[in-house]
Amino acid sequence: MISHIRQVSLGLPDLARARDFYEHQWQLDVVGVDDDRVYLGSACAESYSLRLRATTEPRVDLLAFAAPRTSDVDAVAERVTRRDDARLVAAPGPRQERGGGYATRFLDCDGRTVEVSAGVEERSYDPVTATESRPVAISHVVLNTPDVDRSRRFYEDVLGFTVSDWVERHFCFLRTGPAHHLIAFTSAGHASLNHVAFEVLGIDEFMRATGRMMRAGHQPIWGPGRHGVGDNAFSYFAEPSSGFVTEYTTAMQIVDEATWRPRVHAATDQGTDQWGTSNRLDDVVRTTLRGRPDPGLWTPPPV
Ligand SMILES: [Fe+2]
């Protein structure tokens, strides 16, 4: 029912500085600019991957998933209306955003605004070639939540996600296809964005992307390393003006969905970083990833 993450929309107080970070440092393409919004694309056919909007405080505006068919969008809205712990914000209909298409929006069990859409226009783009370290897609999003199990059940029931793995009972990885995870929930005192991960072509391009950021004066808050659970390489950086965390990643595990059974892993250094090259997952890293309580919860964005 969900094929991939179409885009993430963030509200930020310093639009110019955030744009500079995501455009010139992170190397997304600016594909459009409105009065208070900047649209940035990865090197893929998706109309855009990241929308930045000027707001008084940092907030998550939208988490937007792509579905193959308009009937999937209808089915999601139908399930939302039958639940007490969700609220439909926009009934299925024409999507009023760059790229058009057909969409619905709702508030999930933690109050995040979620969009599911189909039939969005593709755009032409400049494909990456070997050694180029521009992002090629959103890989996954990790969300902080006060109740991992409640969020897990919600995304299974409403959007058709399947659990891939756990780290103890405080970190749950979910997928909708063979890639090990598209989203994950981790336990925190509040709901907020943990990080958005952008995929690059391969390990060499991943190290080049990490090194490019370091040479530009951005030290990774965590990484480079390679996670045990999910097998993906990671380097995490914080956008200076908002504190939102983004990750370069590549080489995530592809599971055989016919035989895969979720495992419960212990939280170990080896599981956290199998290469052993990253800094420790200490309180400073955890605090940065936990972020602040999101003022965007229960408050859908105006656009
Ligand atoms: Fe990640």
Image (cartoon, rainbow, N blue to C red):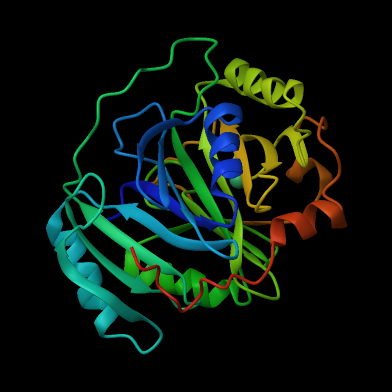
**Which quarter of the figure has residue 74?**
bottom left
Taking the spot 21% from the left edge, 60% from the top edge, the residue there is 103
Residue 116's spot in the image, x, y percent? 29, 59
Give the image location of residue 198, x and y in percent. Answer: 52, 37
Q: Residue at x 35, y 18 (%)?
A: 126
The quarter of the picture where residue 20 lies is: top right
Where in the image, quadrant-wise, is ligand 1 located?
top right
- The answer to whether one can see residue 237 in this image is yes
Would residue 239 appear left or right of 49 to someone viewing this image?
right
**Eyeballing the image, is 268 above or below 59?**
above
Residue 75 place in picture, x, y as percent: 19, 68
Where the C terminus falls, by quadrant? bottom left
Residue at the image point whose x is 41% and y is 33% from the top: 30
Q: Position of residue 217 (x, y in %)?
A: 77, 28
Viewer-proximal residue among 243 and 261: 243
Residue located 31% across and 37% down the image: 46
**Left or right for 251, reference 171:** left
